[in-house]
Amino acid sequence: MQRILLCPDSFKGCLPAEEVCAFLKSGILKANPRAEVLSLPLADGGEGTLRYFSKALQKTPETIPVQNAYGAPKAAEYLYFEEEKTALIESAQACGIEGLDKNHLNTKAASTYGVGELIFDAVFRKGAEKIVLTLGGTATTDGGMGALSALGVQFLDKNHLKLRPSGEAMQKVSVLEIPDGFETLKSVKFYFAADVKSPFYGKAGAAFVFAPQKGATEQDVSLLDRGLQNLATVYRQSFGREIADLEGAGAAGGLLGGLYAAFGGERLDCFSLLSKIYGLEEKMRTADLVITGEGKTDSQTALGKLPVRIAALANRYRVPCVLVSGAVESDFNASALGFFKAIALKTPEMPVEQAIQNAPALLTAAAESLL
């Protein structure tokens, strides 16, 4: 009997990871009705992470009203553990790219304000002493301006006029005004769960690597990167922490770097957290085949995103790992990263919208053909 382990990420803008698993399983069982298929939908800190933690831990989340990336009202969730005085917050719940119009993204105007609202609620309403924040899947590149604004910090320009937190405002920041009540937040221990290792700014940083997929033009990217450089300087002057070379500071559009500058904290590996909760290594040992996937695979995946982490773990236990992706770009070398095979659902001549619309059938057919 074949034991097949399914552990994909979501196909962003197309299907959640649970549905990806369901369609892959359908194809597998068509080819081999006797196969034993175990579905473990995963996330890399972006959308869906909180849902999987909630399911695995059998915990009901708190729900509060917050602002989304563009300031519109929305409901967002977080998990609170009373005994540990710990809140688990997914940044994408507040300022995620999921659910926004992909044709009108504008990361220059986006803000992480809603993440700050979640942190504020967890600390001042629930009494959290620890915050575990997962980072990924956001529409923002504001260096944490929004989140810190929601926590009371005022960002002022050279004329001491208050700035609205956003990506395009970063380069105008000259002075921070820090409220008296900020000391309470400084006593909170922050843990940042992110698999991205990008720095705050620079060619490998938040703006250059991630802003283009959030609606930024080439000119926007340069503006945002200059803003992040300026913000890093202002943060150092105000909080005394240097974040220019902090690994992962560019996660969630620099949100990690901004919060670390203000509060310090510890960086965690989101994949390792999920892996431990799900007992992923034990399940990997007994599998004959592992299938992972994501909506689009390119050079960014190689920076430590979920499919590459799955492949590395599978290789450790000498289990072949297959990547099934909506699209596999030419700058991604699957075999060099430990994949036995890479399958793209979208052919070069197929329009993206057609691939998205037919994703269920394409996933099923890909799995059936593979088996």
Image: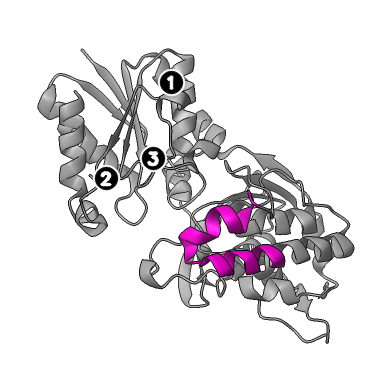
- Residue 330 tag number: 3
Which percent across, then down, holds residue 367? Answer: 20, 31
- Residue count near mark 2 (Cα–Cα under 10 Å), binned few <14, some 14–19, many ≥20: some
Magenta span includes 182? no
Helix or strand or loop: what does disc 3 sit on?
A: loop
> Mark 1 belongs to which amino acid?
Ala
Q: Residues within 10 Å of mark 3 (few under 14, many from 20)?
A: few
The span shown in magenta is: 203-226
Residue 181 image position (x, y, % from top left): 82, 70
Secondary structure found at label 2: helix
Judged left or right of residue 210, residue 358 is left
Q: Is residue 209 magenta?
A: yes
Which one is earlier in the sequence, the residue at label 2 or at label 1?
Answer: 2
Please determine whether, in this image, residue 339 is positioned above or below residue 184.
above
Please tell me the numbered disc located at residue 314: 1
* Residue at the spot of label 2: 19
* Cα–Cα span, label 2 and label 1: 22 Å
Name which residue type carries label 3.
Ser
The kind of secondary structure element at disc 1 is: helix
Mark nearer the viewer, 2 or 1: 1
